[in-house]
Amino acid sequence: MNSQEVRERYKRGERQFVGINLVGINLSDTRFNNINLSSSNLMGAKLNNVEFCKVNLSEAQLIASAAMQSDFKGTDFSKADLSGSTFVDSNLTEVNFCEAILVGINLSMSNLTKANLSRVNLKGCSLLLGTVLVEANLSEANLCGAVLSGSNLQGANLSGANLSEANLNGANLSHANLSGANLRGAKLDNANLQDCDLTGTKGLTI
């Protein structure tokens, strides 16, 4: 299915696109809100400057897809594969990344306020620089060696998260929940830890 056909079907009121093949499709500059693309294949898709709010992309294939300055507020990416994808300077507030595959994802300068990233694997991710993660759920997430320097994690839930060797220099962690988190070898120079819950943290030296 090509981009023109998708646009025409959407204009006719169709919202169910479950399991369709959209490999390499260019949907840039389009508005597709409240549609169901679960289990669809959007590998290599171009999604720049799109409005995809409250879209169901659960279990979808988004490997190597590219989105810049796009709006995905409230979209469901649970159990989706976003390996090697790029979501730069985009609105990802309230999205659901629970159990999604995010290996090598670039989320630089994006807003993930109140996003659900519980149990995701972001090990070694160096592309979270300057990301807004205010009140995000990162409980039990693997952030081992991740670069989060300068990120805003105010009020985030990092309980049980693996932050060993992570770079949190200059990060805002005020009011964050770090209970049970692994902070062995983490870099915390100039990080704001005001009013954090540090109950049961491992490896923290202040």
Image: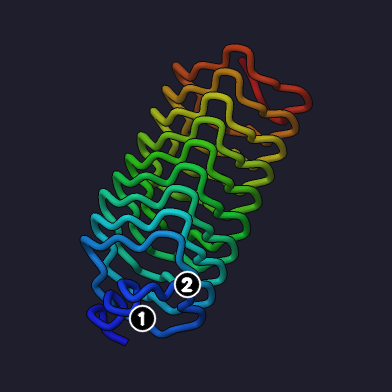
Q: In this view, does 128 lie above or below 157?
A: below
Q: Where does the N terminus fall, quadrant-wise? A: bottom left
Residue 37 tag number: 2
Q: Position of residue 174 (x, y in %)?
A: 55, 18
Q: Name the residue under label 1.
A: 22
As drawn, is 36 to the left or to the right of 67? Answer: right
**The residue under label 2 is which amino acid type?**
Leu
Q: Quadrant of residue 137?
A: top right
| Residue contact between numbered discs 1 and 2, judged by CB atoms under 8 Å | yes
Q: Where is residue 114 in the image (x, y as percent from the top left)?
A: 54, 37
Q: Nearest the camera: 22 or 6?
A: 6
Q: Residue farthest to the front?
A: 12
Q: In this view, does 85 lie above or below 171?
A: below
Q: Position of residue 4 (x, y in %)?
A: 23, 80
- Say which label, 1 or 2, has the lower sequence index: 1
The residue shown at (58%, 12%) is: 194
Q: Residue farthest to the right?
A: 200
Q: Where does the C terminus fall, quadrant-wise? A: top right
The residue shown at (45%, 41%) is: 112
Q: Position of residue 110 (x, y in %)?
A: 36, 42
